[in-house]
Image (cartoon, rainbow, N blue to C red):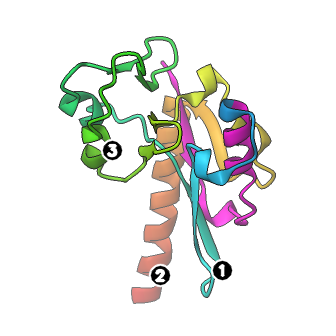
Amino acid sequence: MNNVLTITPEKCTGCRTCELLCSFFHEKEFNPCRSRVSVISWEKEGFSVPMMCLQCSDAACMQVCPVGAVKRDPETGAMLVDHSRCIRCKMCTNACPFGNNTYDVQLDRILKCDLCGGDPQCARFCPSGAISYVKDLAASTRKKKMAASKFKELFREVV
């Protein structure tokens, strides 16, 4: 069973450390534009969420690639782009329902989370613990508990 990245939005402080670490790990420069993770912030509400590839089990990016340049890594479960095969048609970026693949014009390639080869730097160094890398089963259980807790809160308000 592969590990998965999980996000706990209420823990995110919006510090953007994940963006800087990601860009430095992959491109050797601190440049959020070159990051595979993007922190979306709602300043007024004081709410931030780190967004990255969800490594979908039925990945649209892989299905639409006309040259088969997007494949799943059997070891990490990450969807990887073979840049030597990629024809830069950007169909994968358009197919992602979450907008988590981007095309870098200067680098002339798709930027997509590759789980840092199995040791995601965003999760390793997230100072608030908003991003974690856990066994798939643990992630599923945690999400169910979070959903149950929300339902409990909602039902309490109704009763």
56, 25: nearer the viewer: 25
Sequence-first disc among 1 and 2: 1
154, 88: nearer the viewer: 88
Circle 1 sits on which residue?
46
Residue pictured at 60% horizontal, 20% vertical: 117
Q: How far apart are marks 2 and 3 (CA)?
A: 41 Å
Q: In this view, does 44 lie above or below 22?
A: below
Secondary structure beneath disc 1? loop
On residue 156, which mark appears? 2
Secondary structure beneath disc 3? helix
Sequence-first disc among 2 and 3: 3
Secondary structure beneath disc 2? helix
Tell whether 4 sits left or right of 15. left
Residue 43 image point, x, y percent? 63, 81
Residue pictured at 26% horizontal, 36% vertical: 89
Q: Which amino acid does label 3 sit on?
A: Thr
Tell whether 92 sits left or right of 152. left
| Magenta region | 1-25
Residue pictured at 63% horizontal, 35% vertical: 133
Residue 7 image point, x, y percent? 57, 51
Residue 159 appears in view = no
Residue 8 falls within the magenta-colored stretch: yes
Q: How far apart are marks 1 and 2 (CA)?
A: 25 Å
Tell whether 157 sits left or right of 121. left
Whether pointer 2 and pointer 3 mark residues with C-beta atoms closer than 8 Å, the reply is no
> Residue most toward the top?
74
Comparing labels 2 and 3, the label whose residue is closer to the camera: 3
Tell whether 3 sits left or right of 53. right
